[in-house]
Structure formats: C-alpha cells, structure tokens
Amino acid sequence: MPKGQYLGELELLVLSAVSLLGNDAYGVTIRREIDGRTGREAPMGVIYSALARLHQKGYVTFSLSDPLPMRGGRARKHVRLTAAGSRALRTSTEGLAKMLNLRLRTTP
Amino acid sequence: MTRNLSVPPRLAEWIVRIAAGRAEADHVLGDLREEFALHTETTSARRAGAWYWRQAISSAVPLIRARWISRHANHNSRRPDNMDSIKADFAFAVRGLLRRPIFTVVAVLTLALGIGTATAIFTIVDGVLLQPLPFARGGQLVTIWQTDTTLRRQATLRDRWNRLWFTYPEYQQWSAAQRSFSGIALYGDQQMAMTGAGDPVQTAIATATPNLMSVLGTHVALGRWFLPSEVGTGSERLAVISSELWQTRFGGDSGVVGRSIMLDDNAFRIVGVLPADFSLSSLTSTTRGSASVWIPLGSDGGGQRFDSSYEAIGRLMPGVPLDAAAVEIDRLARAAAGRTERGARLVPRLEAETASARKPLGLLSAGVAVLLLMACVNVGMLLLGEAPSRAAEIATRRALGASTSRIVRQLLTESVVLATLGGIAGVFVAFVGVRLLVAGAPPGMPRMDNVAIDATTLAFCAIAVLGTSLAFGLVPALAASGTDANETLRARSGTVGRRQRRLHGVAISLQVAMALVLLVGATVLTRSLRNLNAVDSGVRTDDVLTLSVTLPSSRYATPAAVLQYYDALGERLAALPGVRAVGATSSLPFSGRNQTTSVEVEGAQSSDTKPNVQRRVIRPGYFSAMGIPLRAGRLIERAESSDSAAVVIDEAMAERLWPGQSPLGKRVKAFGGWLTVVGVVGSVYHGRLDEPPRPTFYLPHWRQATRQMTIVLRLDGDPPSHTVDVRRALWSVDASIPMTGVSTMASRVALSLSNETYRTALLDVFGAAAALLTAVGVFGVTARGVSQRRRELGIRIALGAERRAVVRVVLREQMLSIAIGLTAGLLAALATSPLLQEFAFGTKPTDIGTMLAAVVGLTVTSVVAALPAVRAATRIDPAAVIRDA
C-alpha cells in the first residue's frame, strides 16, 4: 500500500461497517452498526468526515436514493464499497491480524 | 403508542446545515432525522431532543472537515492542509528574502520609514485629539462661550467675538434657570506671587465655583474641596493645591491639610490636594497647563474682581443633545445680558481644548499618509522589479500544477513578511519620532503630555502593516502570477514583458505625483515661514531683555506706592553696567497679554463710533528701549504732571480714527476723561506676525498706576548674561517680588512662530523623504531596465549606435513616466491647495514659482537618480554581451 493510503482506526471501522451492510449502508445504519458492535457512539459528523476521506481515497462510492417521508422528504446517501476499498480493507485487516499474532506469540 | 410527529430542534438543525454545507446538508439532516424518529419512539421527546443537540454539536467540526476533504477529492494526492501550506509559505518567503539581502534591507527600511512616521503622527493625533478627557464620561463636558456679534466689526476683538467669558453675575442669572446641564461651573485663571520658603515665585492660580468637582465628576485626593458657603468676598481664604505643588513644595506630606501658603501676602489655608491626573487648563490663557493652586471664587483678596470674567464648563444631562442645550443657553444668556447681540455657544470640551491643533495635525496626517503610500509604491516597485527574475520559478511551479490563487498567496505571504519586518523597524522609528515630536512641540500645542505610544498606537501600526502589505504586494503578485508559463520557459533570457514595463511606468508616475504634492506643501510652508520671519515686528529684538513684575495689592494699595516702587526699580536698573535704556509696559508685544478699551472720538458723526483699540500703560524710556520710532509730535516726558491728559498713539490708530489728517491735538475719551494726542509712534505687531498691527494708544504710568508691568531693558552684549544683576537690583527694592518672564524679545518673537516653525520643519522632512523615495524608485527602475536590456543595448552599440542614442533609449520611457507624474502631481497639488491656504502667509499654494520650484527640484532629483544606470548603459561592452549570448 502506497504511503498516505493507510486507513485510520475510524476509517477502518466505517469501511468494515460498509462492507458488512452491503446494499443497506448509509449514515444511520453505519453509525448503528459501529455502535452496536463496538459500543462506540460516533457522532454523525464524524462518520461523514471518515466517509469523505474514504471517498477521496477511492474506497467508496456514493449514490442517492429517492426522497423519503420518514427523513423529512430527504434522500439517503447510500455507500458502496469499491474494489480498491475491499482490497484496502483486506490489506489492513490482514496486516493487523499478523501484527496481533506476532504480539500474542511474544508475550506470555 | 401513537407515532410521534415531533420535529428535531430547529436551531440544532440549522447548526448542522451550516456546518455540512449546501451539498451535504441534505443527507446528514436526513440521517439525523431518521434516527431522531427512532429515538422519539423509544424514549421521551425531551431525551430525543437532547440526543439531537449532542449530535449537532459534536458533528459540527467533523462536518466542516468533511467538506474540506471532499472539495479536494478530485486530486489524487493528499494535499497539505491550510496551516501546513501557510507555514511552508512563510518559511519559503523568509528563505527567499534572506537570499536577497540588499533588496530586503531597502524594502524594510522604506517600509519602516513609511510605517514609523505614520505611527508617530498617529500617536500625536491619538493623544491630542482622540484620547478622552481625564474625567469620567468626559464626552458630556461642554465649554460655554459668550458671543457678541457687535465685536465682529471691531479691529481688536473680531477673532474673539464667539469666545467671550462670563461674569459671575451673568452666570448666576442664566445658570439657575437652565435645564440642560446637571451642573455648570465657573473658573478663571490669574497669577499670584507665592512667598514663604525660598525665592518668591509667580504661580498660576485658578479661582472656581464650589460645584467644579461635581461637574467634572472627580474628587480631591486628600482633604476636601470648597463648600458653597465658602464663596464670595469676605469669606475665609482657602486653597486646594495641585498634586505637583504638594510634592515639590510640601514633599508629599499628608499633614499638609491645615497648613497655609502665602499668595500675594495673604495666607490661604490648605484644605485639600487634587489627584495627580487632574488637569483643567484655561482655554484662553497663554500659559497652558493646569493651575497649581485653586481658590474659591471671590476670595482672591482683590487681585481679581469678583464679577470679572470666567470660563464656564458644564456637564450635559444624559440624553440632552448638544444642539438643544445650545438653544436653551443661548436664549438664557441673551436674556441675562439684556442685549440681542449677545448669546452663548456650546463646544464639547475636548474640541474646545484641541481646536488649535486640529488643522495642523490634519495637515501632518495628510502628509504622512502620502509618505506611507509612496513607501508602498516603492516596495511594490521593488517587488515588481524582482518579478522577471522570478518568472522562471513561477512558470515552473505553474507548469507543475500550482493554481493562480496558490501562487498569489505565496507571493502575498512574502509581502506580509516584509511589511511585518518593516513594521517592527517602524515601531522603533515611531518611538524615536514621538520623542522628538513631543520634545520639539510648540508650547501652545494642547495635551502634549497625553501623548505616548500605547496599545492603540501599536494596533494602528499593525493595521498599517496589514494594509501596506496588501497595497504593495497585491499588484506585483497578480502581475507575476499572470505571466504565461509557456512563453517564459521558452524565452532564453528574461526580457521584460510589456505589461511589466507599463506597471513600472505607472509606479514611477504615481510616485512622482505624490512627491510633487508633498514638495509643493513643504515649499508653501517654508516660503510662508520665511515671509513671516521677514516681517518687521516694529520693535528691536536682538538686545532687549524683558521681565515681568507684579506687585501684591495688599502692600501696594495706593497708586503712589506702586509708582514709588517702579521709580526706585527703574533707577536701580538704569544704574547697572551695560544698560542702555530702561522702560516698562503693561502689555508687552508677543507676551500673550493684551488690553483693549473702547474710546469715544471727539467730533465723530455717528453715535455708535466707539472703536475698540488696544491700550498700554508705559513708563518713560519704553519707546527708546524697544526701538519704536517717533513719527510725529512728541513723547510724554517725566516732567509732565499727572493730570495733564496727554496720550501717545500709534500710526495704525491715527490711520483708523483720523485717516488723511494729522492726529496731533485731537481728543479721545477713555476711562471717563478726555485725552489729547501729543505724539504718534510706529506701529508694533502684537501677538502674531501674520496679523497686522492693531490701533494702539499709550498712557503714562502715572496716569494709571498698573501693578503688573513688564520691564524692558536694552543692553550691551548678550542679554541673558545680565540676568543675575537684574535680579539683584529687583530684590534690592523688594525681596518678596518674584521675577518672571525673563526672556529676550528675539526669543519671544521666535516663540510666537513656534507652531509655524514646527509644522514647516515636519513637512520639510516629509518632502525630503518623498524626494528620497522617488530617487530610490527611479534609480531602481532605470538600473533594472538597463540590466534587462543589456543584450539589446549591446547589439545597438555594436551596430554603431552613438552614446546619445543609447542614453535616449534608456531615458525615454522613464522621462515619459516622470512627465506624466509631474502633470498628475500638479493637478493634485491644485486640487489640494484649499487645504494649504490656511497655512500660507504672503504666498499662495497655487503660486507659479512654488509649483515651478517643486517641478524643477523633482525633475533634477529624478534625472540624477537615473544617471548611474545611464552611465552603465553607455559602457556596455558589445563584445562581452555577444559572447554571453
């Protein structure tokens, strides 16, 4: 992975959530997914700034839904993982796993 | 459970919308709305609202960051954020400036000159005109003048008609009825001899009404102020002393209350001490500054009559507009005077106190503003000159994808760094400048003790730095960023673009124009001052020493006692070695003291011809000591008895009252008696050399035994060296009489021109600085032009161009710019001439000679500045040029 393309912790969480949610990934579900799995309640704005960074790196794409009444007549911004995004997710998680294994081995 | 239709908090939504920006707000608000709906179903509406608020507040900053990220999403690489690039720009600018030390030093010095002088003058303006009075809510304090329209026709008082004092009875009448002021106080100034410890000293005394402290909104620092019952003739003599007198005479002793001071041989009991920052100067007295001793009105032991004239100061009731108060007081004052031509005029105290300084400071501010602009143009020109050598650098950066705004920002950063360095150096210039300006300030300049460099002036300096960096940086930055990358990279040696050269031309023109305006101003002032100095004041000045004597009324109660004293003093002084003539007058020219009287002319047709003229009481020897010539008739000699009603008049009075006739033998009525003119003497300028002499008559001392006289001595040798002898003679007659106002006539006349001298010197400095800046500018541009056209000039020389042709090529453009600048400058000078009219004496701001002198001076300066470059151009070695190519 080239320098400057590594993932921050929150970016990793968001990217994982998008990957898990598949077709149903957007602000609310991503936030709830992270909250539900890790107990970490990130403000909506933080999710969006992470998404913006991921988008800038080319790991996610956005698409707009039709306006929905339950959202006060506003559209959802759906998030989809790109091929580069799933590659990056894999590289990051694999690297992390290796690092953790290495640690587990050396510490009693 | 019914579906909760409650909506999220409006304000929180608004915050999110603002933070997210137009493009993103929709989804974010939708998401929050959706989740908010979930929350309202599971918890209370209040908790859901609180949740929304938490979301909004903690999301604001990340949302702004998200906007920033997505805006630059198109670029592949991570861009440095704003702070990083600003830091980089600064580092780059500093490195770049260090690499060009000469350029940097010249630019910083130029800016230091501009910013420093501007800051120094602003410091004066701030301290004198802008700082509030040293009293609580000083904006409510108003000076009240009496007006008398009939005086406008008088030769002697016409410039005072709307600045007259009030008498105590008048004040009592109208001040009781007024409703506009919460209080109005009266105060007046006089001089008394303070005796006791050490030599007797003439001291500035102020008499005041008991409500003065409450009107000013201040309190004594020690003891108490006067009570209403302590005012009036016959009450106990009380005094409140200034903090300064308390320190100098009583060593700051807190037991001073209850002790006495001797003033004019009367004991005054000290009841209080004023605070150190108390300052209330008399607006009309010539000795600026606050009095040392304050005494209640009417308790001055007869020195000043209870009903004589005082200045009025009032505090406006909150909410009462000045105009409304002015109408009321004007009406009341007119009713109190019982004459329709009388009235009153209100002037805010600060304005009244600083009136004399406003126009000169305005002139200096204008001058310094032009200078600052010139400094900007000069540094801008320096930056512009750098542009061709940097064109390659900029073109490269542009080719690598730097945007115009990015390049402009980087170049502007350099300007800001330069201006900041210039500002720091400018603060030092300002510190020195303010010190010089305060030290050299004329004595009549109000509130100079209030002038100091403080946070306000430093803030001004910072604004000047910011403004100048934009002013001199923007045009070159835009010009540089606009260079075509392709063209510049292809060209071998940077030939100057036509646009670049045109900008240079405009800068030179601007500079010449501004310098011309300043030079015309300086020339007008210099010529006016020279004209003033050339005015014959009508008296000898070089070898005449003057000193003032005031006899206390207590011990010199009768005219005989007064005359006896002055006779004895005159004899002692005349006996001193080196004394050629001794005389005395009640009002010395250029002393700031004046006396006027209305006289009735015998045989005058219309009844209202009671001209107001100046009167002086003199002692024999006065005319010969002062060198005032006798024009007709005779002088009044000692032998004449006191009841022979003889009077000597001056030529101005003869001309005014009896034009075309001999005034000898004519009679005027003054002080209830008829006086016969026996002699005519030359006219004498009284207060100012720009006001022609006013009609004056001279009475002998034995007719009016004035206690306060100024002694004049014509001496051999250096007048001040006689001071010790003179003092010994004075105190040998009466050792309790203070000797004050020891001064030569020459220095008195010079002092009367101190305002003019001060502003002329300053404007001359500005003019010289402007000429210097122009020279630096022209030199820089010409030299650069030659070095950039070296190849072209070399080829011309190689092809046989004569020196003359080369010179013409080099100078042609510069001369055109200078000519345009001179024309524009002349127009600007004509346009600003009304501003200068005020300060011109014996010359006009539009005077052809003045304009011509400025034009010639500036042209010569410019040509001389261009000469080194022209010489360099003619010495270009064609062979070397062609080898280099």
Image (tube, rainbow, N blue to C red):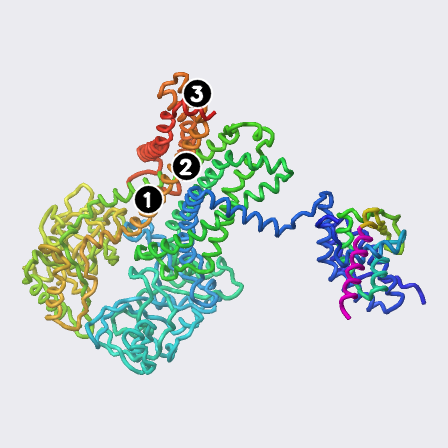
Q: Which numbered disc covers residue B673?
A: none
Check disc 3 and give the amino acid type. Answer: Ile
Q: Give the Cα distance between marks 3 and 1.
A: 45 Å
- Residue drawn 54% across and 34% down? B391
Looking at the image, is mark 3 or mark 1 earlier in the sequence? 1
Per the image, the residue denoted by label 1 is B764
Residue B722 at x, y = what percent? Answer: 12, 61
Label 2 in the same subunit as label 1:
yes
* Residue B201 picture quarter: bottom left
In the image: residue B770, left or right of residue B675: right
Q: Main secondary structure of the magenta part?
A: helix
In the image: residue B26, left or right of residue B674: right
Q: Nearer the viewer, mark 3 or mark 2?
A: 3
> Where B254 falls versus B720 (above or below)?
below
> Where B530 falls versus B686 (above or below)?
above
- Quarter holding the N terminus of chain B is bottom right
Residue B315 at x, y = what percent? Answer: 45, 66
Q: Nearer the viewer, mark 2 or mark 1?
A: 2
The subunit letter for the residue under badge 3 reads B
Q: Which numbered disc covers residue B795?
A: 3
Residue B640 at x, y = what percent? Answer: 7, 59
**Dot 2 crowding, Cα within 10 Å, few <14, some 14–19, many 20+:** many
**Boundaries of the magenta span:** A88-108
Looking at the image, is mark 2 or mark 1 earlier in the sequence? 1
Q: Give the Cα distance between marks 3 and 2.
A: 27 Å
Check disc 1 and give the amino acid type. Answer: Asp
Check disc 2 and give the amino acid type. Answer: Gly
Q: Give the Cα distance between marks 2 and 1.
A: 20 Å
